[in-house]
Amino acid sequence: MYVHGRDDPIQRAVTREQFRSKYRLYRSDPNLQAMHALYPVMHIFDNHDGLSAPGDDQADGSIAAFFEHLPVRSVDGRRIWRSLRWGDIAEIFLTDQRSYRDPTLDESGPLGTSTEERPEILDPSRSMLGPEQRAWLLAGLAGSTARWKVWGSQLMFWPWRTLPRLPGQQRGAGVYLNLAQWDGYAAERLAILDHLEAHDVRDTVVFSGDSHVFSAAQVAPDVDDPGSRPRVVELGTGSITSNNADENGYPGDDVTRPLFSAANPNHLRFIETERHGYVLAEFGASSAEFEFRSPRTIHRATSEVDTLARFTVAAGTQRLRRVR
């Protein structure tokens, strides 16, 4: 997909050859090549890779070029969901949240959409994963013998609300900011959390992207009940260089932090909407550590890097403890 401000001769690719051209262009970046020379990368695609939803006219070309240019083994030429094992420390589950989803719901406005306006948010028949992939994920998380079950989620999993559930409303109710992510498929999110609770699955960590904000959350089956035990911890990453909310004209941290903290008091532990960067994670037998790192500028090739926050999670707890 075309991103404003980038010198790309093909604004919107559709055919395989057009997507091949995009891969040749972007993967000619010497900094990207240096990163691949230093680190292994587990690839999964999202809407900016050319596939937003089933029936997308970009789907065939984008998927074909994806498998041509990236070291991903496919079962059937289209499937990208898979797991990778790192000994007894971690098993990593990568999911496809674009190919099988039910249609994204219309949103009401910039401050979010309530479950009163869109009761379909809590419709248990709506799915982002589709039945086969969801069954695979649930069985994998419950059956894994690795210490850490790591889920690579293209989209933010924690409830991103501007207003919490009101008294008398059902579990999962509230005003949600972005229905393209898991907030638009809240019933399936609850089903996943309920499954983890029913099977007492512990040490599940979600890494999410797409939102262009740093976030840390611990998500329970009922985020409005302080006594509901968290079943996953989630680390969301800011963008590397793409525009963040404030760069697109939306309010910055001085407005969004108090708003989101008040609407999500039990699960949200950190949010930063203005900085760019990445998450550094270290997994051990008894704990995991996560560090939000951000360069002071993205306008020079080199920059000092700040640590915005650091969290640890003791094995078996699913609770974040901020240490910096």
Image: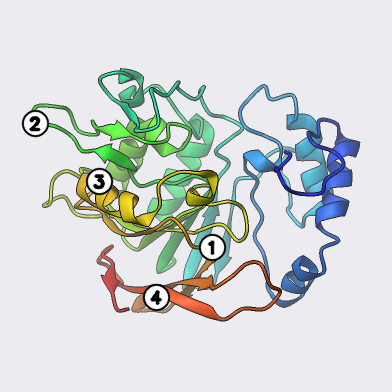
Q: Earlier in the sequence, mark 1 or mark 2?
A: 2
Distance, label 2 to label 4, CA atoms, is: 36 Å
Distance, label 4 to label 1, CA atoms, is: 20 Å
Q: Amino acid at mark 4?
A: Glu
- In depth, the one of 121 and 187 nearer the eye is 121
Mark 4 Cα-neighbour bin, 10 Å: few <14, some 14–19, many ≥20: some
The label nearer to you, 1 versus 2, is 1
Q: Position of residue 33 (x, y in %)?
A: 79, 68
- In depth, the one of 265 and 92 nearer the eye is 265
The label nearer to you, 4 versus 1, is 1
Q: Give the colour scheme shown.
A: rainbow
Question: The residue tagged with tag 4: helix, strand or loop?
Answer: strand
The disc placed on residue 151 is none
The residue positioned 53% from the left and 50% from the top of the image is 247
Q: Position of residue 97 (x, y in %)?
A: 55, 38
Q: Which residue is mark 1?
A: 276
Question: The residue tagged with tag 3: helix, strand or loop?
Answer: helix
Distance, label 3 to label 1, CA atoms, is: 37 Å
Rendered-image quadrant of the N terminus: top right
Q: Earlier in the sequence, mark 2 or mark 3?
A: 2
The label nearer to you, 3 versus 4, is 4
Q: Amino acid at mark 3?
A: Ala
Distance, label 2 to label 3, CA atoms, is: 26 Å
Q: Earlier in the sequence, mark 2 or mark 4?
A: 2
Q: Amino acid at mark 2?
A: Pro
Q: Amino acid at mark 1?
A: His
The disc placed on residue 198 is 3
Q: Are marks 2 and 3 in contact (CB under 8 Å)?
A: no
